[in-house]
Image: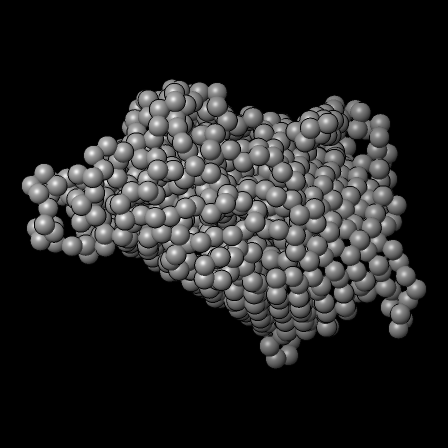
Amino acid sequence: MPLHGQITKTLLLTTSLTLLPPVMALAQSSATTAKTPAGLQDVVITARHRAERAQSVPISLTTVDHSQIKNLGSLNLNQIKQLVPSLTVNAYNPRNIGLDIRGLGSVGFFGYDGLEGGVGVYVDGVLLGRSQLTNFDLPDLDDVQVLRGPQGTLFGKNTVAGAVVVNTKIPSFTPEADFSASYGSHNYWQLQGYGTSALGSGDKAAVSLAVHATQQNGFIKNTVTGQNYANKDDKGVHVQALLQPNTNLTIRIIGTYDHSDANCCLTLPLGIVNGYANGAAPNVNALTRYENPGVSYTLPTINPFGRKTDVDSWTHYAMETASLALHADYDLSGYTLSSITAAGYYNWYPRIDGDNVGIPIITTGLAVTHQRQFSQELRVTSPLGGAVDYTGGLYFFYQQLNDQSRSTYGSDAAGVYLANGNRNVNYPAYQAALNGLVASPTDLPETYSGAAYGQATWHINPQWDLTGGARLTYEDKTGREYQDFQEGGVNLADAGLTPAQLTVAKTLRNTFSPDVSYHLQHSDLLPGGLVTLSYKPQPGILTYLTYSHGEKSAGLNLTTSNVPKIVPPEKVDDYEIGAKTTLLNGHLLLNGDGFWTEDTNYQSTIFGPVGPGGTTISYLSGVPKVRSRGLETDIHALVGQNLTLFASGVFNEAYYEKDPNGVCPYELSNAATSCNLTGRPLAGASKFAASLGGEYDQPLPEYDGRETVAYFGGNYLLKSGFYSTGDDSKYSYVPSYGVGNITFGLRQEDGAWDLSGWVHNFTNARYYLFREVTGGFPSYNLVIGEVGDPITFGVTLRGKFK
């Protein structure tokens, strides 16, 4: 059976079982007071700003704790997606990371500074203004809660597609320390450590310290220089202090610093576009252009999974983030008054080969970014036990980015970009205009956001609850002082050109690097709301119906291209029906939901040509209507006392419901200024995805008076194919794939030590992360892509001290 058929059959079966009428669930689950197994239904979440059992909350969510992800290696969101199929992390490079939930939320595979994503990421209650900040490890990670659908009535910022809530460990007054040390293939090594203890005597103050360092040789080899690419070199430190000066006041101070330095991220040639769909040849043909004057080059053999490159410019980045947060909670007669004050920054220093090939077309491509953010949240949470409980808050957020881009054109740019006609006449003009030219656009976008939000639950009776919520956000965005100016290059007046050639050279230089400057400003008032009706026919069964509405502020197009500079606000209406069941005396959790989401003015990054035969650029665009609808399921089972299994899956039809004037796929772009994409799949969204796994534990004879266990486990992620770019070009299609990890080892049950072996991508699956026709100005018709990591393996030793 094909991959998508297997996933579909599993999803339809399990979700149908989950959504059966409660009476059928009652027949399978007898009432009992016996203690149920830990780790199944007894997961506690804080998504609604209070401690609650996940199975009792009428929200579609998935929770992943530290024990589930520790064998994935790096403890960041790019790894956690392996266990949450409805969460997609699109990572073109560490600066350009997009998060999707149910196919919505991301601005594409290319980060864009004039727009935030629709998936809010909160680390210890603090919103990360840019998705790049999710790249680093969290050695003190406690759990991750992925909430699906609009969540604005619980959070103050844009969360129209969902929220990812990340919690780290709170310092303990009981001394504790743990560490892990790993070594693996490609000279991989990783060290992580965590320690916590009280300060002085008593229970007034405690601190914790978490450190991490990871290095690995790259998987891609430069056949000319011998240099490796796609390596890792990450390190960081997280410090926390917990203060409890009296029984009513709790203060938590959190400081972080992380740094990454690597030769990354390299795309590989996948092929050449020799013609458009109507048979016409490209204006600049990739096979012949390398025979132009001044250019003598042959592309390497197309073999992306051979992981070879011949790029002739240094490709490298350095990235650092730091943050400081102050949490204060005050108990006032059962009401909790909370304040979260936080500030942070993000710096990105790249230098890349801008042309992806071994000749000097674009010798330097970089976009230095400095991001600064500040947020303040004030919140009140009522006590539980009454007829109504509620949470309400005020939220302020400020963010500034300072971007300085730089593209340097090399000596072979003229031969590559020269059109097929008039080659001999125009080549001197192209060479004079481009060789050494530096295009240096800069921009300074700022965001001011303020919101009031609240959510309340009326407990009508022990079985019925009615939850309502509202949010109102005012957001002002400014694109201050966008500039694009020219540097470098020869003085055209002294280049010895004829008058006709001089005209061509001036026009070309102004096209590649126009001298422009402008200012953008836009503000929005954005409402949101939620209504949920939930019903509990008996303990262990929860059903719910939800309608929610969310809005995301307008986006700014910070570009010189002839595209609209303001992209309208995005509006999302979401409808859900779900059930959470705890069956077989707590040995089986069977959860599922159906969802239907209408997204108006869907904001997306378009990567494609502008106009017939036009230049390929990245810009923001609003799609009139997008629809995402489908089924989700989460299953956790304890078989006997030794085997735990899980299966999570999503069937999602995410498509352009109305897009009559969409950007044309690259293969059609020479013939039309726009194309009807209505009914086409939404970029980045797989129709089917499933994550399967489990662990088998075998008790061994006691050693030194302690219980010892041998274990074997793993997980496997299946994804159907998707398009990487918003035009649904055939050149951007990523075929379906499956990738899995296994782990095995010995451990003491009290956690004193754990020795494991692991294999990541154990089938050595060959798969793509994205594909596209290369950018530049204009495109030179080379298809490029980024491939997933090959099989890796190693060992890890963990220890814990109390």
Residue 652 visible to an observer of this rendering = yes
Residue 362, percent from left and from top = 32, 51
Q: Residue at x 20, y 39 (%)?
A: 424
Image side of residue 68 versus residue 252, left or right: right
Identify which residue is drawn at 10% across, 46% down.
497
Q: Is residue 683 visible?
A: no
Answer left or right for 570 relative to 81: left
Residue 493: give x, y in percent of width and height: 8, 50
Which quarter of the rendering shows the N terminus? top right
In the foreground, 716 or 537: 716
In the picture, the quarter occupied by the C terminus is bottom right
Q: Between 308 and 561, which is closer to the camera in this rendering?
A: 308
Q: Is residue 328 above or below residue 599?
A: below
> Which of the two residues, 714 or 101, is positioned nearer the viewer here?
714
* Number of numbered callouts drawn: 0
Residue 402 vertical placement versus 3 (above, below): below
- Say which quarter of the image contains residue 676: top left
Name, please, the residue furthest toward the bottom: 200
Residue 687 in percent (x, y) is at: 58, 29
Q: Left or right of 560: which side holds 91?
A: right
The residue at the point 37 percent across, 44 percent down is 112
Q: Position of residue 117 (x, y in %)?
A: 43, 42
Nearest the viewer among 248 and 216 is: 216
Image coloring type: one colour
